[in-house]
Amino acid sequence: MCDICMMKYQAWQKNPSRFRAMTGINIATFERLLPCFESAHDEYLSEYDLSGKYRKGLRRYTMYSNASLADRAERLVFILSYYKLNSVQESHADLFDITRCQCHELIHGLSKSLRMALRMAGCMPVQTDRELQEILSAIDRKEEKVLLHDDTEREISRPMCEDLQQDSYSGKKKKHTVKNALIISSVCLILYVGPAYAGRIHDKTLADTCCHIPSGFSLWQDAGYQGYWPEGVRIYQPVKKPGGRELTKEQKFFNRDIAVGRVRVEYAIGNTRRYRIVKDECRLRKNLFVNHVFHTCAALHNFRITHNPFNYKFKLT
C-alpha cells in the first residue's frame, strides 16, 4: 500500500503544474513547509493519536511501515490536496488508496499538525484583539502603519436549528454562511482573522465587535463600512453615490485610486480561497472544523507570500 501511495506523490512531483493544481502550492514552497510539518507532525502524534485521543505515556513518535500513508511528505500532500480539492471523503480515500475511516482520521489529525507547522513557521494570523494589539504596537515605521480590512463569507451546511438557520442565512449570498473579519498589512499579509460569526451580521457590526484599530494607523476600507471611524485613525474609503445624483469627475478619480489601493485585500482573500474547502461548502462539523479551516488557509497564504512577496507600484500612505 505504501508503494502505491508514494507513487501518487512522486507522480505529482514530476509534473509541477499538476502538483500546484492538486495542493495549492508549488514544489519549492512545499519543500520549505515540509521540515516544519515533519516536526509538528511528530510532536503532535507523540502526545495524541490521529483520532485526537491523548496517549497515556509521552513517547517519541515512530512511523510504522503498516501505518496509513507511512511517509510524512505523503501525509502533507494528502492534507493539502484535501483542502485544495474539498472532495468527499470516499473519493479522497480512493485517491490515496486508503479506507474512508482512515481518511477521516487523517483529515482531522493532520489538520492539527498542519496548524502547528504553520504556527512554528510564524505564519498564523492572530485570532484575538489582544494578540492583534501586540502586533500593531510593535510597528513603529510610518510606511508600515497601513492596514486594510474586509470580511469574507463561506458557505456552510444548512443548520438543523431553525434559529440558527435564520441567523446564518445571508441575504447577499442567498445561502447559509459564516463570516470572518480580516485585517491585512500593506504587503498583503493577513495579520488577523476574526472568529466565525453567522453570515447575517453586517460588516460594520462585525468590525465594531471583533477588534480595535489604535490611533496613528491608516485604514483602507470599502463602502460597506460607512460610519466606521476609529478615533485617531485615518480612513481611506470610496465616496458613496448620492441618491438621484451622479458622482463628480473628481470623486470618480478618487474612488478609482481607493480601488487600486484596496485591491490587495482582494488578492489576499482570493489567494486564500484558492482552497476549495473555503470557497465551496465545508461539510465537516467535527472538532469545530468550520471555525479553524479559514484560519489555516490564511496561514498558507502568508507562508506563500513570505517567500514570494508581491511587488506593488501603487504605494499606500
Image (cartoon, rainbow, N blue to C red):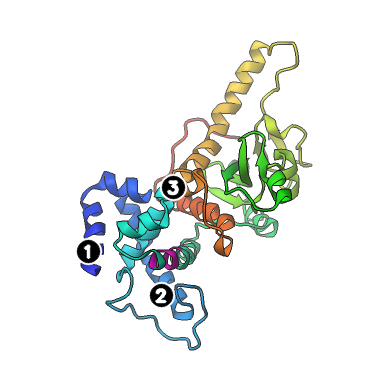
Q: Earlier in the sequence, mark 1 or mark 3?
A: 1
* 145 in relation to 41, above or below: above
Residue tagged by mark 3?
A: 305
Image disc number at residue 130: none
Q: Is residue 106 magenta?
A: yes
Image disc number at residue 4: 1
Q: Main secondary structure of the magenta part?
A: helix
Start-end of magenta stretch: 102-107
Label 1 to label 3, Cα distance in Å? 33 Å
Q: Is residue 127 visible?
A: yes
Residue sitting nearer the eye, 108 or 191? 108
Q: Amino acid at mark 1?
A: Ile
Q: Residues within 10 Å of mark 2 (few under 14, many from 20)?
A: some
> Residue at point 24% right, 68% down?
1
* 155 in relation to 112, above or below: above
Q: Earlier in the sequence, mark 3 or mark 2?
A: 2
Label 3 to label 2, Cα distance in Å? 26 Å
